[in-house]
Amino acid sequence: MKEENLKYKFKIKNAKKPSQKKIKKTLGRTLKSFNVLYAYAMFIFHWTGLKYFAVFILNVIQKFFIVQYLEKFHIIHIPVKRVDHKLDSKIPFKPEFAQCYLDFVNYWIRPMCMTMKRYGSFEGIKLSAEYVRYMIMLYKEAYKIYSHCLTTTVRPKPTTKATKGIQFWDPHYLCVPSLHIAIVVLTIGFYKMLFEREEFTEPEKDQWNSELYTHGIEIAESVLYMKQHSVNCISAAIYMVTKTAPELLTEEMSIDFIDSMFKDSIYVEKTDSKEITNYIKKMYKDLMEESRNSNDWTSPLKEWLKNYKIQAQN
């Protein structure tokens, strides 16, 4: 029992297995075909979901938005450090990736819609609430770094309405670790675990794991194409999730994810993409190695921030 509690530390209750009729209704549907508004409605009208979703929203406001705006308007004074790297210049600025970049919210909400449709809202909400508890943890853990040192990068002048909007509303002080990346790898790991634990059918597992992984890679690449993050932010985010949710994201899974980035890119040269992913892997491995001598996952990252010097870009 203790081993199960450790493996499924945020599990709420056992969800009743769905009928074959319900399974058939969602079988074969793409995750993008599920309406995200359904998930919002279910979280509002179900107490199990509402209590966790409310806590999540409060954490996002407090630990993501408020801290940035307080710094922007000089109300608080947390050290701000630039974390650009010379390899960032080998990834072109591509404003057309704005929609993909902004889709990361729907990215993690759609699977919750799927589970609520597959199980029925009363049972599916238990599984969705389990995921939301992981999200709450993620924001709390990331804030341990943000409250210690804010980080930023140089962004190019916006050239489209979408990029102007992103840069206007985002004060851009929370680069390390990237929550975009952390949420992507957490989502991939959580549903890979869930599909196995809840005994989803093989066709369901194959389809939805593949969709989450493929679109997750696209979103991960988009944060670099949009110049919202540096390559350093990727390593830090994946490291954070590996350390705080090792039951969902192993070191092997992390390396595979990094290796998949820019694999089929038409915008980054093959030799450059290899150099970029090798650097991300090395930083990730270095952080993991240093963490073995510490009980606090933040210590290696705080030390990295302390010692990091901006890499001159070409």
Image (tube, rainbow, N blue to C red):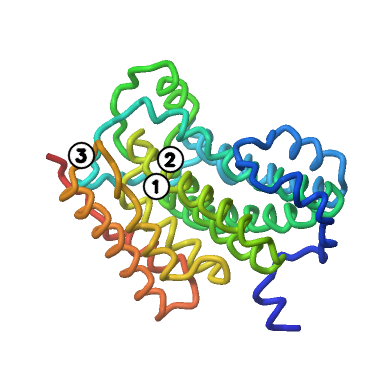
Pick whichever, 173 or 163, lies toward us.
163
User: Residue 173: which disc?
Assistant: 2
Residue 141 drawn above or below residue 4: above
User: Which residue is disc 3 drawn over?
Assistant: 89
Answer left or right for 282 relative to 178. Answer: left
Marks 1,3: beta carbons within 8 A: no
Pick whichever, 91 or 269, lies toward us.
269
Q: What crowding class fits label 3: few (fewer than 14 Cα within 10 Å), some (14-19), or many (20 or more)?
A: some
Q: What crowding class fits label 1: few (fewer than 14 Cα within 10 Å), some (14-19), or many (20 or more)?
A: few
Q: CA distance from mark 1 to mark 3?
A: 25 Å
Element type at marker 2?
Answer: loop
Mark 1 vs mark 3: give the one in front: 3
Q: Earlier in the sequence, mark 2 or mark 3?
A: 3
Element type at marker 3?
Answer: helix
| Residue type marked 3 | Ser
Residue 239 drawn above or below residue 81: below
Marks 2,1: beta carbons within 8 A: no
| Residue type marked 2 | Tyr
| Residue type marked 1 | Pro
Q: Earlier in the sequence, mark 2 or mark 1?
A: 1
Q: What's the residue at 42%, 36% (across, down)? A: 172
Q: What's the residue at 60%, 58% (across, down)? A: 205
Q: What's the residue at 48%, 44% (across, down)? A: 215
User: Residue 79: which disc?
Assistant: 1
x, y percent for residue 198: 72, 65
Q: Dividing the picture into quarters, in which one does residue 251 lie?
A: bottom left
Q: Which quadrant is the C terminus positioned in?
A: top left
Q: Earlier in the sequence, mark 1 or mark 3?
A: 1
Q: Is residue 147 visible?
A: no
